[in-house]
Amino acid sequence: MLKISLFYVVVTVCIGLGYVGPVLAGGEPQWDLLIFTQRWPITVCLDWESKGPNHTCAMSDKPDEWKVHGIWPTRLHTMGPAFCNKTWHFDPEEVRPIESNLTEKWTNIEIEGASYSFWAHEWNKHGTCAAPVVEAINTQLKYFTQGLKLLSMYSMTDILSSAGIIPTYTSYYYYYNSYSLADINRAIKQRLGVNPVIECREFHGKNYLFELRVCFNKHFEFENCDGVVTSDDISKIFLEGDQILTNCQPDNYIVYPLSDNFGKPPNMLYVQLYKFIEWLQWFTL
């Protein structure tokens, strides 16, 4: 009886400390799917800078490539779990072998705190909930390596460009190319065979492509993202025969900004040439 009582005392203390997963048998975090999220650096930077006058961004050497945001375990029809083990802290030494790749592909765009604060947040919030359940990501090194692997295999840079969707010149007044929500959804669905989540941010009355998410089961096999909840403003709409999970305004085209030219005054010769070509296309209809 004493041994049993002592066991329950230990269990109670561990739960109180937030130590779940690796320590408690049968106490694994409960979730259904993994959401793999990629983000577009230019829009992320615009969003970050818009939230504070002192906010600045750090871009990698390849800013016109999609970056990893995270691998997020989730229950269907709700958000979470999160911060499943408050004593399993992020340790920069554990990811030291892949640090250069993380800097390039899992970039801490929003400059805030230590250089590894973004990775620490992703591990503490999401990794501690995923790791106890899936052996392939049951250490910090495995978790972050898997994110890099998924990006290499399913980069939205390649998926979108193969469908003719590429980042283009953007300024506050000129949008040389923009794409429909249905086009972006179709490009991902045709390539991967599942329904993604498409997230935008609004600037100057326009949809800017912000994040793209795809879902996996616990064996890293694709699943539709139907039923996942990633933010309050994501909803299900029907467009051109497809069901789309998004917060983008379906009646507005989506801007996919190119980093090199954003915010620079447009070359008026190119602007006039572009408008002339548009006029010719209209005139010859």
Image (tube, helix red, strand yellow):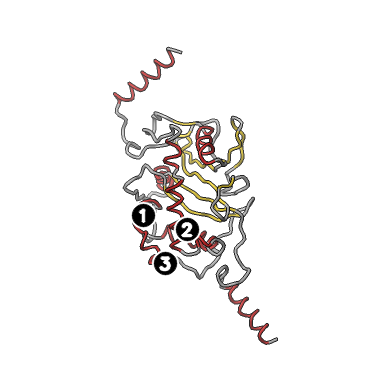
Q: Residue at x 59, y 45 (%)?
A: 224
Vertical position of residue 284 compared to residue 21: above or below = above
Residue ID for mark 2: 122
Residue ID for mark 1: 101
Looking at marks 3 and 2 on the same chain, the residue that comes earlier in the sequence is marked by 3
CA distance for labels 3 and 1: 17 Å
Left or right: 102, with 77 as reference point: left
Dot 3 falls on a residue whose secondary structure is loop
Dot 1 falls on a residue whose secondary structure is helix
Residue 268 percent across, percent down from the top left: 30, 25
The image quadrant where one finds the N terminus is bottom right
Q: Marks 2 and 1: which is nearer the front?
A: 1
Dot 2 falls on a residue whose secondary structure is helix
Q: Residue at x 43, y 32 (%)?
A: 164
Looking at marks 3 and 1 on the same chain, the residue that comes earlier in the sequence is marked by 3
Residue 22, picture quadrant: bottom right
Amino acid on which the number 1 mark rests in the picture: Asn
Q: Nearer the viewer, residue 155 or 166?
A: 155
In the drawing, what numbered circle is on residue 62? none
In the drawing, what numbered circle is on residue 91? 3
How dense is the environment of label 1, judged by Cα within 10 Å: few (below 14), some, or many (20 and up)?
A: some
Residue 179 percent across, percent down from the top left: 47, 31
